[in-house]
Amino acid sequence: MSLQSHAVRRGKTSSFLALLLCLAWAGPAARAQEQEKKASASASGKASLSDIETSTSADTAADDKKSSDDKKKDDKKKDDKQDDKKDDKTDEAAAAEAAEALPWDLLHRRYNTWGGPTGGLFIVDPSNGEVGSVRLQLGFDTYSGNGFLLAKDHVEQDGQTLSFSWTAGKIFEVYAALGNRGTSTSKDPLVSLTAKGGPNSLSSQGDATLGGKVGGKIAPLVYFGGDLRATLANQVGGGGIELDATSVGLRSALSINLQELAKPVPFVARFNLGYLFDNSAKLVGGTEDNAYARLNTAAAPRADETRHLVNRFERYAMGTNRLDRFSIGVGFEVPVQAAERFYLSPIAEWRLDIPVNRQGYDCPNIKSGTAWGSVGSVGSVQDGCYERTPGSALPMNLALGVRAIPPIRGVSATLAVDIGLTGTSTFVRELAPSAPYRVMIALAYDYDARPP
C-alpha cells in the first residue's frame, strides 16, 4: 500500500470519528431542548388550567351569590305574602268580631236620605246595604212663619217626598224620589209672573229624581264612592215634565265607620262634595218672556228690566235657581242600642251650597236705599243680586235629627229639623230663598235581605 492510500484511509477514518463525535454531542443537546420545550409547554398548560380553574371558581362564587340573593328575595316575598295574609286575616277577624258584637240592624242595615240614596238625613254614605235589600221612605216636611219673605207676611210650605232605593250589587245602588210642594203666603207680592200682582199660593207636583250610586270599602273602616242623578222638574201646577229644565248632579262620598272596630265605637262620619248643573230656571223662561212682551213700550231694556222676573215667593215655591251649585256636606251619626231590639241614631249634618254662574246670568242692578226700601230684604219687594251680596245670600243649613228603629222588622222612623243658617233673609234673583227651618218626619220600611 502506498503512503497516499494510507493517508486517504486515515482521512476517511478521521472524518468518520468526527461525525460520531458530532452525533454524540448533538443527541443530548436535542434531548435537552426537547425536554425544555416539554417543560415550557407543561408550565403553560398548568398556567392555563390554573386560569381556567380560577375563572371557574369566580363564576361559581358569583352564581352561588346570585342564587343566595334570589333565595333571599323569594324568602322576603313569601314573608311579605304571609304578612299580607296575616293583615287580611286580622282585618277579617276584626270585621267578624264586630259583626258578632253588634246587632244586624246597626251594622248591616242602610236607610234612605231625603233624596233617595242611602246615608244620613241628607249626606250620602258610599257603603251599601246587603245585596237585594230594598228600602221605601215617605217623608213630610213643613214650614210656617211670619215675616219671612216680606214684612208682616205669613208663609207656609208643606212637602211630601217618596223615596226608593235598591242595592242591586255589592257596590251598586239604584235610587229614585218623587216630590210635591204646596206654598202659600198671606201677602200679595207686587212683582210676579204676570207683572200684575202675584199669586197667593203655588204648587209643584211630581218633581222626580233618578240616580245610581257606586261605592265600597277602600281601607279598614273607610268607604268611598259617588253617585250621579238627574232631577226632572214639573211645570207649575203639575202640567208635566219640562225636559229642558232637567238638572244633573254629581257627588263624591267618603265615610268612616268605627262600628267595624274589634271593639266597636258607635260613630259614623260622612263627607260629601258635589256639583249640580241647575237648569230649573228654564221652568219660568217662557213665562218671563211673555211677561216682558206685555210691558210694551213701558219696558226698559231687557238687561235693566225687573218687573217681568219671578219674585222671591215664586222662586221659593218652585225651587227655581239661575245658578249652579258646588256643595259641601259633613255629617255625623251615633247609632246606639237603647233597649233590647230598639235602636236610636242621633244625626247632625252641615251643608253649604256655593253658587256658580255657569249660565252667565247678568243680574239687573237695583240701587239700595230707594223708595222700594232696602233691596233684597223683607222691607223691599225688589230683589238684589248674588254678586253684590254673596255671603249672606248663599244657602247654608244645619240638620239635626234622630232615627228610631223599633223591634218591628224593617220599620224605622225619623224626626229632624233643617235649620237655615244663611239665605233666609237676603234675597237675590239668582237663588231660591232658604226657609228659616223645616220640621221633617219620615216613616220607612226596608227589606234588609238578612240571612235566615
Image: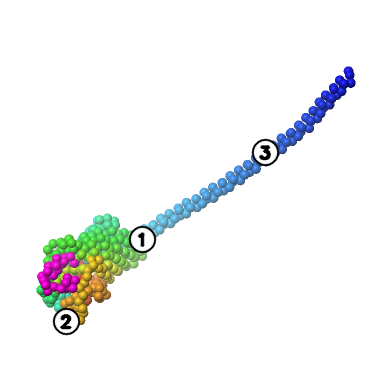
Residue indicated by mark 1: 219
* Callout 2 crowding tier (Cα within 10 Å): few <14, some 14–19, many ≥20: few
From mark 1 to mark 2, how far is it between C-alphas?
Answer: 61 Å
Residue 122 shows in the view: no
Residue drawn at (65%, 40%) of the image: 45
- Tell me residue 40's x, y (percent): 69, 39
**Pointer 2: what residue?**
371
The tag earlier along the polypeptide, 1 or 3, is 3
Task: Give me the C-alpha separation between circle 2 and circle 3.
Answer: 125 Å
1 or 2: tag closer to the N-terminus = 1
Query: Of helix, strand and loop, which one carries label 2?
Result: loop
At label 1, counting other C-alpha atoms closer than 10 Å, the crowd grade (few under 14, some 14-19, many 20 or more) is few
Task: Give coordinates of residue 360: x percent, y percent.
Answer: 23, 67
Q: Is label 1 in a helix, a strand or a loop? A: strand
Amino acid at the residue labelled 3: Ala
Disc ID at residue 41: 3
